[in-house]
């Protein structure tokens, strides 16, 4: 870690700026496991990028931190989880990500 990074982190801590937080799935094949969180490390990352890869009816779910404009540029307009493929969605809070995930995987809405 270089000096500039340490200065940015120190300023963020002193000013009370908290990192953007995204869900973390402990088991990538189970949307119900997305109950943990992880802090985004880049100050420009302001949205959660949900990757869904479906193969043979099984969906691999992963959240990564992203800049909102980049995420929305690649966001999927329609995703059919019954067909093999790759879908991308964006959400801007833990609560919004859960609502979105529950809509995509209705059986996961516990």
Image (cartoon, rainbow, N blue to C red):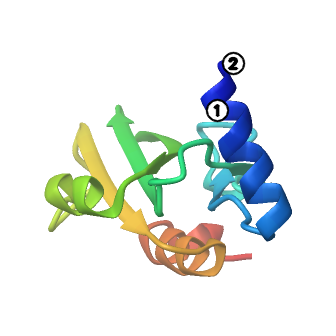
Distance between the alpha carbons at the discs numbered 1 and 2? 6 Å
> On the picture, is 108 further left or further right than 45?
right
Q: Quadrant of the C terminus?
A: bottom right
Q: Residues within 10 Å of mark 1 (few under 14, many from 20)?
A: few
Q: Residue at 62% of width from left, 61% of height from top?
A: 20
Disc 2 is placed on an element classified as loop
> How packed is label 2: few (under 14 Cα within 10 Å), some, or many (20 or more)?
few
Which residue does the image show at 47% across and 63% down from the upper left?
Answer: 46
Q: Are marks 1 and 2 in contact (CB under 8 Å)?
A: yes
Please tell me whether mark 1 sits on a helix, a strand or a loop. helix
In this orientation, does residue 25 appear?
Answer: no
Task: Tell which residue pokes out farthest to the top in this image.
Answer: 1
Q: Which mark is residue 1?
A: 2
- Observer-nearest residue: 3 or 45? 3
Name the image quarter holding residue 2: top right
Q: Is residue 25 left or right of residue 89?
A: right
Q: Quadrant of the N terminus?
A: top right
- Residue at 69% x, 54% y is 34
Please report the residue visible at 61 percent of the width from the left and 54 percent of the height from the top.
31
Residue at which label 1 appears? 5
Q: Residue 4, how many percent across, how many down?
A: 61, 31
């Amino acid at each position: 870690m270089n000096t500039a990074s340490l200065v940015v982190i120190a300023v963020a801590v002193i000013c009370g700026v908290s990192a953007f937080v995204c869900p973390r799935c402990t088991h990538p094949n189970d949307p119900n496991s997305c109950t943990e969180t992880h802090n985004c490390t880049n100050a420009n990352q302001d949205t959660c990028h949900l990757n869904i890869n479906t193969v043979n009816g099984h969906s691999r779910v992963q959240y990564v931190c992203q800049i909102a404009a980049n995420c929305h540029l690649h966001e999927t307009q329609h995703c059919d989880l019954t067909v093999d493929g790759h879908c991308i969605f964006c959400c801007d809070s833990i609560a919004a990500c859960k609502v979105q995930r529950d809509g995509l995987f209705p059986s996961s809405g516990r």
